[in-house]
Image (cartoon, rainbow, N blue to C red):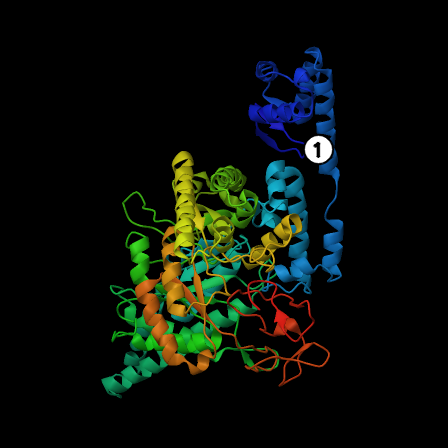
Amino acid sequence: MKVIKRDGRAVEYNKDKIKIAIEKANQDVRKSERATEEEIEGIIKYIEELNKKRMLVEDIQDIIEEQLMDMKHFELAKKYVVYRYTRALVRKQNTTDESILGLIRNENKELAEENSNKNTMLASTQRDYIAGEVSRDLTNRLLLPEKIVQAHQDGILHFHDADYFVQPIFNCCLINISDMLDNGTVMNGKLIESPKSFHVACIVMTQIIATVASNQYGGQSVDMKHLGKYLRKSYEKYRKEMQEKYKGRLTKEAIEELVEDRVRAELKSGVQTIQYQINTLMTTNGQAPFVTLFLNLEKDDPYIKENAMIIEEILTQRLEGIKNEKGVYVTPAFPKLVYVLDEHNCLKGGKYDYLTKLAVKCSAKRMYPDYISAKKMRENYEGNVFSPMGCRSFLSPWKDENGNYKFEGRFNQGVVSINLPQIGIIADGDEEKFWKLLDERLEICKEALMCRHYALLGTKSDISPIHWQYGAIARLPKGEKIDKLLYGGYSTLSLGYIGIYEMTKLVKGVSHTDPVGKEFALKVMKYLKDKVAEWKQETNIGFALYGTPAESLCYKFARIDKEKFGSIEDVTDKGYYTNSYHVDVREEIDAFEKLSFESEFQKLSTGGAISYIEIPNMKKNLEALETIVKFIYDNIQYAEMNTKSDYCHVCGFDGEIIINDKNEWECPQCGNKDHAKMNVVRRTCGYLGENFWNAGKTKEIKARVLHL
């Protein structure tokens, strides 16, 4: 039987919904007035025996009321009517007016600070946010079960990206750029054939990135190794042209030099195209594409020479930066760069060490790239090395029908994060209570994640041809459902977690860096990992444990808990919770010790994990950075280096942003006071929103998240 919802949608009949509704009304009446299990089953049987192919949801509710009255449960029937009426009122209530008007008037601070990549002053960004606010409202009132909405509001969990939940689109992915370039693709109904040169391949790739970004809400990653063959094509094209033109007139060496010059020029132009296209294109999300370029030299790659040239050019151009409106070279937000350390480039005498030295210079000046240890990743992912998705989550290993590992062309269905410190607060030092509560809340998280899954189930490939029909994810026929890609671990559902440090302090009274705390923290992490594995076994869906950054969520959970439970020393009093398994920023721990410690947690957080270390004056510490890079290769899978130096995007000043007599931030070089154009907040936390003064109104600025 199909049930026709109020908005006209036809959904499968689900008797559990009837049972839950009556049981909720049951809880509000005297025991003698309650309907028994048998009576509830009798009502369900009555409805089912009508044998109707379609029923309006209102008709079902009318029958329930009539049946309760016939059973003499008058008080219960009344409660059910009240429950039904309350739900109707909630559905009709408009919750978007103030947030939307505040956005247009530029008064909605929460939205303005939510995403540093979006400028809420722009009409295109506002349009996306307005749609998002409507989506969030519909999600809370109509689409999600009440207990999940309530859990989200209470800070029990965070249902990520509710502003996109109304549409059947997913989170993040690894684009199958190899298939799209080699076999062609279609955009806006136009066939794009396989490129014949490197420069054209770069143009096509950036157009694919922009189109993909406009049809999903999370990040995307591209493995740059697939461009190597197109640089080879350009080389062969120029070589043929030059030989035909100059054979017999110039020496082989001279011809080869001309060819090399042409290839180098095209290489520079192609990489520049990628950098400028990504930074100037605007997606329908109201921002530049959230994209990561994966820089990995594979030992057996037939195009390793070309790919080394490509990586070198990408790092060289990132080191230089990109000009802002004042003509000053600044650090672009995108594309993000992830550089892989392997035997041949880990600064131990390898052939490609020169690339890593360049990467270190780039990190010192531009904060990127991040670093992945191929050695450690192979240990954690069945011998594989592959890119994180744009949101820094990792896929689980998956084999196709031929037994080959496949990572590109896969995606994440969505994310729900659990608030671990809140469980510790309520448990109040009682471990038995902690584990019981953790179990209960994990079940709510699972139900919320399944809502993400069900929202995608039944989606037809026509919803986003670039993803489902033309190669970014798959090449399904028109009209085919994407369901087979939602099962078997091909795609993932991510359980995020916040505040291992605070949770441990609450339950054990010590940090998770203490031996006693560490044992407990690892036990919890192992339990979370086993739980998602259990869910995967039950559902045949690829659940994963995700410990990647969620800075604004660290602040949100802490704020909710402080309002609810008051100021708790070293927990809610800080104004933030630590990200995932990270060591609290105030602990005295050196970079090497921190990376070694956190590597044990990364092994358990296989759905996503990145660690940060902060180094003062990185530009003057290249030797120290190189030492750390060597250490990363041997000790931890994924790490990023940050610095405390400030930066002005208006004039390029790279020193300390001052605080003037009016207690305003000010660039000492150009006088810029626009916070959005200054990196005065540290990249250890990544927060780029508005800061606030501390309680004493001194010249110390507190970042809202993670750093002082």
**Which residue does the image show at 59% across and 55% down from the upper left?**
572
Residue 671 against residue 641 in the figure, above or below: below
* Drawn side of residue 385 relative to residue 460, left or right: left
Residue indicated by mark 1: 87
Can see residue 472?
Answer: yes
Quarter where residue 348 is shown: bottom left
* Drawn side of residue 553 relative to residue 107, left or right: left
Residue 274 against residue 467 in the figure, above or below: below
Where is residue 97? Give x, y as percent. Answer: 75, 50
Where is residue 135? Give x, y as percent. Answer: 65, 47
Which quadrant would the N terminus be assigned to in this image? top right
Amino acid type, residue under disc 1 in the picture: Arg
Residue 646 against residue 108 in the figure, above or below: below
Quarter where residue 241 is shown: bottom left
**Which residue does the image show at 67% across and 74% down from the upper left?**
698
**Which residue does the image show at 46% across and 49% down from the upper left?**
412
Can see residue 358?
Answer: no
Density class for disc 1 (Cα within 10 Å; few <14, some 14-19, many ≥20) is some
Residue toward you, 20 or 660: 660
The kind of secondary structure element at disc 1 is helix
**Which residue does the image show at 70% across and 76% down from the upper left?**
663
Where is residue 362? Give x, y as percent. Answer: 43, 76
Which quadrant would the C terminus be assigned to in this image? bottom right
